[in-house]
């Protein structure tokens, strides 16, 4: 192609438009190639990714990216092999069945970052202030993004926000490759995506001219706010893009998102109202516990939606994206003793909670004040008294929480003694601010009879099994502050309900610090019953089909396989009993079936889906364990070739202390806790989910003689270790 005098990126796109097929070498994944693959896929051009196996670690590099898990690639060692494989390739073998209809209820998609930096928080703050409903891919929640999921997310969007991040940030390599692929998809679908970069860093040639640069907070928020307004306009326009559907019945299936945040509008159609949900809905106060991916957020969203149906209920939903509570705790402990620390944190939480309740009440009644001058005056007096300026009322809970933490830290750094801190900070809150905020809440009793506070994500990013004692104390003081507010408001005839959503391990640490284990009214949402998971998937599959075809679609998705068991039984056995993993696994298997032109799910589709999911668990779960516990990222690979049953001596040999980073017993407990290892019993292998996620019951199955115990490797990992 002639390039002299031409705009190169336009030439590349023009060549792809004219091509019959795109052959893209991914031996060294780079931004330009992934952008071009995404662009070609969106134009419905067949794509053949090729991989040179003669290059060291080529497969490992591609698998780390994750995008090609369900797309597949062709491998070669030399030019002749590559020529033969390309010559034998058939157009019919490539079908893109991942395209979805536009999601008008959540028209905006955001590619989130692993590190929740200020730049990232400014983007989300501006989006939330715009009131545009959005979906997001959060690598903290779902570490792996496949091409199938990316195509579904982008094709369903009217607007797309893609942060381009600095190479020094954690996970920047994988994030920016995802952004390149998604930007190519966006341009191919005719979506004017916003690729936004902090300051002026390097950018790939293919899309350098499409990047918006930002150097400070106000500029970032202005760019995003204007883009959100434009997204709403684009969302009203008709699109020729339509869901392709697959061959036959399988093409009707839409399993939804494995992250509840991305399906807030659709969740009600197939949400399972379990006994735990009913308890949480009735509870006047308590703690909802569950593992990561167990469905706590789905319960949170449904309870918030149900409570909002009552116009006299003020629902205050608090989900910080980040917070500096640990930093505040460290600063406090440098100048105060434990008693003053407890006193200060308790006052801090009461102040934060009362302020958030007042701000939410103000937000709800503000539209009613347009023709009510006395209400306007009441609101203005509250804003003046508590200094609720534009930055406060237009901000989100994350920014307000971080501002409050910074203010406490500044006060700590100014004071010279413990006595000064108590008088300046604690007494000021108890004697002045908190009583006045409480009266401000009660002043809205003519509008609200009930306040319902929901707190989630406070423990986001905290390492399982290694949560600091003072972090747990922070949660304890939050729950006690909620109880104190409940007592104070109830005395004054205002009903107050509250729920705090916590990971199971954080809750276990919490109850260890109290003699009354029933004090927190725990509601567990962990899934240990296969029948429940079966019902969950059936609800999603059947609800996406035409009413008269529900049974037929279900039978096509869940046929009897070669061993006499149904396909879903295989999936549940290898899902670690987590709804999020199960939905992701089912999505992979469904993608394989549709792309291979199968009318029903086959044994081959299930085997390939299980293999891909197992590879993901072995690789990405290893990185997750490294990040949260300090174990080597390749810890699971040390089990390759050892089979599915291991003696205690074999496990000790595999987990030798010289490379673990942790002691042997601590690492073994971690692998049992995560479900990688189980215990062999007389009735077969037992994993932690078979014992209601109670590690002590699992230890009882192992017996007192640990040295003669036999361990089992979870079948979810076995294919990835083959």
Image (tube, grey):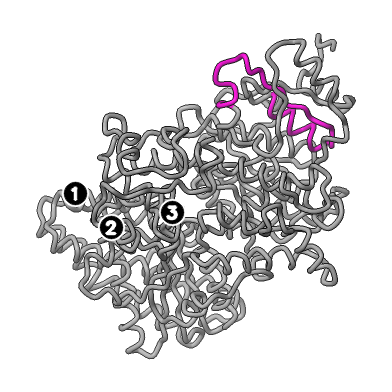
Residue 441's x, y, as percent? 40, 79
Tell me if residue 42 is in the magenta stretch.
yes
The magenta segment is 33-61
From the viewer's perspective, is the residue at label 2 or at label 3 nearer?
2
Tell me if residue 522 is in the magenta stretch.
no
- Kindly report the distance in space between the C-alpha atoms of the residues bearing marks 1 and 3: 23 Å
From the viewer's perspective, is the residue at label 1 or at label 3 nearer?
3
Q: In this view, does 491 lie to the left or right of 223?
A: left
The image quadrant of residue 1 is top right
Q: Mark 2 or mark 1, which is nearer the start of the sequence? A: 1
Mark 1 and mark 2 residues within 8 Å of each other at the beta carbon:
no
Please give the residue where the numbered disc 2 appears in the rendered image.
703
Describe the element under mark 1 as helix, strand or loop.
Answer: helix
Describe the element under mark 2 as helix, strand or loop.
Answer: loop
The image quadrant of residue 162 is top right
- Kindly report the distance in space between the C-alpha atoms of the residues bearing marks 2 and 3: 49 Å
Above or below, 670 relative to 206: below
Q: Residue at x 70, y 24 (%)?
A: 33
| Quadrant of image for the C terminus | top right
Disc 3 residue crowd, few under 14, some 14–19, many 20+, Cα 10 Å: many
- Kindly report the distance in space between the C-alpha atoms of the residues bearing marks 1 and 2: 56 Å
Please give the residue where the numbered disc 1 appears in the rendered image.
414
Mark 1 and mark 3 residues within 8 Å of each other at the beta carbon:
no
Disc 2 residue crowd, few under 14, some 14–19, many 20+, Cα 10 Å: some
Q: Residue at x 62, y 50 (%)?
A: 585
Q: In this view, does 513 lie to the left or right of 210?
A: left
Residue 149's x, y, as percent? 67, 45
Q: Mark 3 or mark 2, which is nearer the start of the sequence? A: 3
Please give the residue where the numbered disc 3 appears in the rendered image.
399
Q: Mark 3 or mark 1, which is nearer the start of the sequence? A: 3
């Amino acid at each position: 192609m002639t390039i002299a005098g031409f705009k190169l990126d336009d030439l590349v796109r023009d060549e792809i438009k004219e091509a019959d097929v795109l052959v893209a070498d991914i031996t060294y994944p780079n931004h330009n190639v992934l952008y071009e693959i995404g662009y070609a896929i969106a134009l419905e051009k067949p794509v053949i990714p090729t991989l040179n196996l003669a290059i060291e670690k080529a497969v490992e590099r591609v698998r780390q990216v994750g995008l090609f898990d369900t797309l597949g690639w062709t491998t070669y060692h030399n030019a002749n092999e590559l020529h033969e494989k390309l010559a034998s390739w058939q157009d019919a073998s490539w079908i893109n069945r991942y395209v979805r209809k536009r999601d008008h209820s959540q028209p905006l998609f955001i590619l989130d970052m692993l590190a929740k930096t200020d730049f990232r928080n400014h983007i989300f703050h501006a989006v939330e202030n715009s009131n545009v409903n959005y979906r997001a891919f959060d690598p903290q929640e779902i570490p792996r993004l496949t091409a199938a999921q990316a195509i579904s997310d982008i094709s369903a969007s009217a607007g797309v926000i893609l942060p381009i991040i600095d190479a020094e940030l954690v996970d920047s390599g994988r994030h920016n490759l995802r952004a390149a692929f998604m930007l190519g998809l966006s341009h191919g679908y005719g979506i004017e995506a916003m690729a936004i970069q902090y300051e002026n860093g390097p950018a790939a040639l293919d899309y350098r001219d499409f990047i918006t640069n930002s150097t400070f907070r106000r500029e970032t928020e202005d760019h995003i706010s204007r883009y959100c307004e434009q997204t709403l306009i684009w969302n009203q326009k008709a699109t020729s893009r339509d869901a392709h559907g697959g061959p036959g019945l399988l093409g009707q299936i839409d399993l939804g998102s494995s992250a509840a945040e991305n399906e807030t509008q659709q969740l009600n159609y197939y949400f399972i109202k379990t006994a735990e949900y009913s308890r949480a809905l009735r509870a006047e106060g308590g703690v909802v516990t569950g593992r990561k991916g167990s469905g706590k957020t789905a319960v949170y969203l449904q309870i918030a939606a149900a409570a909002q149906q009552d116009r006299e209920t003020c629902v205050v939903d608090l989900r910080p994206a980040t917070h500096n509570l640990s930093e505040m705790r460290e600063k406090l402990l440098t100048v105060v003793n434990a008693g003053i620390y407890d006193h200060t944190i308790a006052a801090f939480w009461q102040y934060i909670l009362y302020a958030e309740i007042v701000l939410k009440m103000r937000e709800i009644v503000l539209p009613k004040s347009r023709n009510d001058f006395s209400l306007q005056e009441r609101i203005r007096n509250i804003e003046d008294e508590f200094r609720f300026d534009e930055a406060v009322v237009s901000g989100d809970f994350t920014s307000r929480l971080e501002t409050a933490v910074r203010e406490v830290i500044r006060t700590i750094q100014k004071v010279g003694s413990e006595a000064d801190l108590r008088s300046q900070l604690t007494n000021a809150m108890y004697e002045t601010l908190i009583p006045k905020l409480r009266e401000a809440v009660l002043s809205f009793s003519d509008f609200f009879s009930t306040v319902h506070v929901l707190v989630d994500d406070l423990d986001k990013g905290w390492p399982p099994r290694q949560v600091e004692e003072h972090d747990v104390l922070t949660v304890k003081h939050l729950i006690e502050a909620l109880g104190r507010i409940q007592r104070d408001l109830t005395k004054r005839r205002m009903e107050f309900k509250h729920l705090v959503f916590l990971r199971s391990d954080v809750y276990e640490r919490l109850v260890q610090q109290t003699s009354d284990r029933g004090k927190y009214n725990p509601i567990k949402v962990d899934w240990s019953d296969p029948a429940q998971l079966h019902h969950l998937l059936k609800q999603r599959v059947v609800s996406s089909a035409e009413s008269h075809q529900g049974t037929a679609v279900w039978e096509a998705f869940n046929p009897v396989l070669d061993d006499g068991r149904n396909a879903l039984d295989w999936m549940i056995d290898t899902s670690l009993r987590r709804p999020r993993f199960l939905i992701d696994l089912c999505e992979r298997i469904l993608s394989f079936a549709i792309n291979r032109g199968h009318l029903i799910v086959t044994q081959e589709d299930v085997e390939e889906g299980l293999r891909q999911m197992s590879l993901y668990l072995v690789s990405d779960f290893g990185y997750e364990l490294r990040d949260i516990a300090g174990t080597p990222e390749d810890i699971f690979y040390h089990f390759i070739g050892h089979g599915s049953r291991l003696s205690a001596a074999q496990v000790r040999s595999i987990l030798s202390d010289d490379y673990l980073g942790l002691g042997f017993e601590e690492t073994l407990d971690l692998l049992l806790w995560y479900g990688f290892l189980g215990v062999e019993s007389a009735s077969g292998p037992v994993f932690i989910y078979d014992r209601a996620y109670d590690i002590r019951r699992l230890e009882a199955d192992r017996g007192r003689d640990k040295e003669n115990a036999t361990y089992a490797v979870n079948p979810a990992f076995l294919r990835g270790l083959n």
